[in-house]
Amino acid sequence: MARPGSERADRRQENYDQAVSSCEGFLLPPQVKSVYRRSKHDMPSMKRVYEAMLKKEKEGKDKKPAGLNAVAAFLYEGIRILGEQLEIRALVRQFKQHELASTKDDIDTSRERLEREIEEWRFDQRAQMPAAQVGLEDAAGTLVEDVKLWLPSHFTEEQRNERQLEEFVVQEEELWVGFAYDCLETVKQWVQTAQTLRDRRRKQDGGSYKKTLSAKRVIDCDRRRDLHIAKYNLARETLWALKRDDAENDFKVLDVEQTRLKSRDMKRQLGDSSIVDGTVWGQGAVASGARRLIAGETAATVSQGAAGPSASVPPSTAQTVMDRRQTPAARERTANITERKPKKAHEEGWIWHAKPAQMTDQQLAEWELEGDSIQWFRAEAEMQRWREEVERILAEYRTTLRSFSKYAAIWTELAKEQDASRPGHIAYAKRMAAVHAERHRQGMVALPRHRTLGETYGPIVEDSFDLVSFVEERRQKQNAAIESILALAKAQLDATGSEEAAADAAAAPIQDMESEEEDEFEEDDYEYLADNEQSMDEDGEVVAGGGRLPAKRAKAPLPKKAATEAAPVANVVPASCANTVTPACLQAFYNIPTTPATTSTRLGVSGFILQWANQLDLQQFLRTLRTDISPSTTFTLQTLDGGVNTQTRSQAGVEANLDIQYTIGVATNVPVTFISVGENGSDGLDGFLDIITTLINEPASQRPSVLTTSYGFDESDLTRPVANNLCNAYMQLGALGTSLIFSSGDGGVSGSQSQSCTNFIPTLPSDCPFVTSVGSTGGITEVGSSFSSGGFSNYFGIPSYQSADVASYLAAIGSTNSGRFNRTGRAFPDVAAQGESFEIAWSAQFGLVDGTSASAPTFASIIALINDQLVAAGKPVLGFLNPFLYSSTGRAAFNDITSGTNPGCNTNGFSARAGWDPVTGLGTPDFVKLKAAVGL
């Protein structure tokens, strides 16, 4: 649930957050992390961070005069690591043969080029301040965002076809990597500016910052070590995406200290080329000869006269080995160089001799760097192995797509050749042509999207294996069936000379194929296009359209040709809905029909804080997740208080897109209106009162029968009189026939997700007695979501319709959390619905969203469909829902949720129980039971 009060910040802050989001999770210095936190939470823009640092330095409050450099380093680290990440993933995506023997050379070349570019500016003391200083604010707001958005807007959908696919893949990789390095050059200027200013301060301080050449080399080695660690972790991320199990078992994320310890152990492997080929560490070939070297703490121990190491210590081909330790007297870093002499073996091991030699800081740093690099070599070698595997799978994938196109053409020709007196044969051939054409389109749409970002390689590897196996099996069966039917018909034609006899001979096999294919449609876990009229024109030609790769997910119910609704049956929720919730999942969870609405009753969606919904994202969502709905289906727009709904795709609101996609995508054919409320209101409530006043004054024919809102406040943000005025307005609108649906909030009992609270924090307008508050659940066996806000109001008393339920719950929990909430307040939420892992389209990409913001439009869509059927039956709409919901008739239409808690304020919050509870209310709805409850 979005909070207007906290999000009314400068629009540039949102751009900045998007720009720096790529830096999260990477290895950044603590100073840079601090800058990030300050900029994200305390400052509305990067410029203000920059100005605040300058001010602190001038006032002498910043004891570490490195503010400017920290800002520049922060930007640099984010862009640099993004660039390296893109380059690594581009290497994996290359479709060329690559011999592992040349892996090390390619790695060295790539690494050296990156390091040269970094050294050109970071350690060049002759850097001059550029004539035109590039503003940090502009860069932070646009740079990385442009990188992310460049390709989706660069290629049009029409260009993505099979003939041009290979060309686009190459262009795509070149643009991503090239653009990342353009960003690097721009950031270089900012760092030079910061470096020059820092040098000036050093001179003013009398040269106290001057470093010796040796110290600079040590710093350089430390920086290189950090670079290798970052590269290693990026390589591991890519491996994880390619094959989760292998990456998890073979690699560990190492911090600086862990890497130092690892390099000590790996020192014995230096010189072993098998490491570069991906051989397990410690299993390299052993050079023949009398000299073998073993390093580590063991060497230091045996040099004092103890027994030598056991034979289980892996040998090495290294010529010298150094081990760092502390000399107790001088506290100096030393190295023990140990070697096995060609003397006879001792019973308990070898005879060891140690000769301590002092190691300089520079030698130590270079030694550690050398050990770190081995991990990177190993990871890169494994990446190349997986690159070849991905190449093979994608080649089979493209072959499969071509087969889809081929068989679509075959079935189209068969449809044309059938006798008009055999309509069943023609219909089946058309259907099969449409099925194969749809599969081909789905794959072609999905392929460029899968190749855009590295993180999608995991799903495409898994799905491609399934797809290739699936298609190969059916292709063989279809080939055999087609050849058999044609041979049978030809033999009959040759024998009798009668085309009618040949058609009759082929009729039975065709009927068998049709029955078998229909069985596969029902049994398979893939979704397909079943309504052949949607993909064939009047002449039987295949019509182009959109779709998606048939990844394993819930099947959308097939469209019915009959106008009447089939008898309701309980749906089985697909297993995929445990990880990703789609409209098809919600239909299965709550028995929601796909039968289109038939009346003009409207569903309203509130939009606040300058968020708006994008129509192109909606089209993409419908093409992918509601293929039975026309992708041209859209919403009407209503604005007030300066509200807008620009269609710049990258600026669409996630909240607004979620609400629109899961009302249009669930309430089939219900007219939806997006009401965009601007920031020019006079109510002092961010337009919350203005939108209600506007709807009250509208004609009844234009007023929505349901209004869903996924925004709100902490109750304490408003004074009691203001809250009462707002709640009274909701009462008036509900009395006019509009059902008001609000998300309960996403902070558990802490309201807006604050853990520092002592008393539980209720949310507004969710705790107003005249609205219906919706909490959240998750999982196939539904459990209350931990973020689902719920509790008791401090402003409004317990309404009569829920008094018995509240009394029962309070008696059950006894003194739990006593004193933290008002036991005489209005209790919320009233009901609940799924709210975890909702798949939405945003900015031309798909992602997952959690929150009661997903639950509210889901429940609102169900009520809108009920209202549509009530109006069609000549009955009034439901209006204010709560008295009906809490009645014995209403509550029987809900699935009681008895598991889950909503922690917050450093407590476990409330717990779900039998009956009403402050986590999931009365439970989740069942559409079929709701219909019966309202008399339909």
Image (cartoon, rainbow, N blue to C red):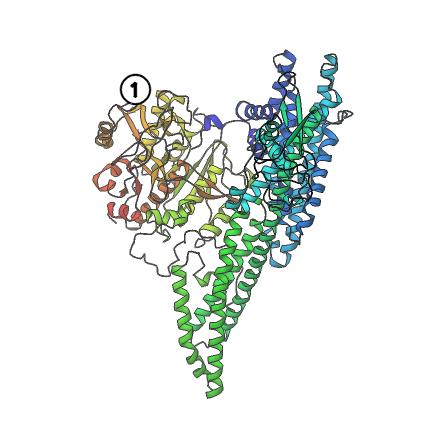
The residue nearer to you, when weighing 879 against 6, is: 6
Q: Residue at x 45, y 59 (%)?
A: 529
Residue 500 located left or right of residue 246: left
Task: Point out the residue furthest to the bottom here.
Answer: 496
The residue nearer to you, when weighing 663 against 22, is: 22
Label 1 neighbour load within 10 Å: few <14, some 14-19, many 20+: few
Q: Residue at x 37, y 59 (%)?
A: 560
Residue behind mark 1: 819
Q: Residue at x 47, y 83 (%)?
A: 499
- Is any part of residue 534 visible from this angle? yes
Q: Considering only vertical position in the picture, is 260 above or below 52?
A: below
Where in the figure is residue 742, as x and y percent of width and height? 37, 34
User: Which quarter of the figure has residue 1?
Assistant: top left
Q: Considering only vertical position in the picture, is 715 above or below 313?
A: above
User: Which quarter of the figure has residue 69?
Assistant: top right
The amino acid type found where label 1 is placed reads Gly
Where in the figure is residue 297, as x and y percent of width and height? 59, 29
- Is any part of residue 146 visible from this angle? no
The residue nearer to you, when weighing 451 against 13, is: 451
User: In what element is the residue under mark 1?
Assistant: loop
Where in the figure is residue 58, as x and y percent of width and height? 65, 13
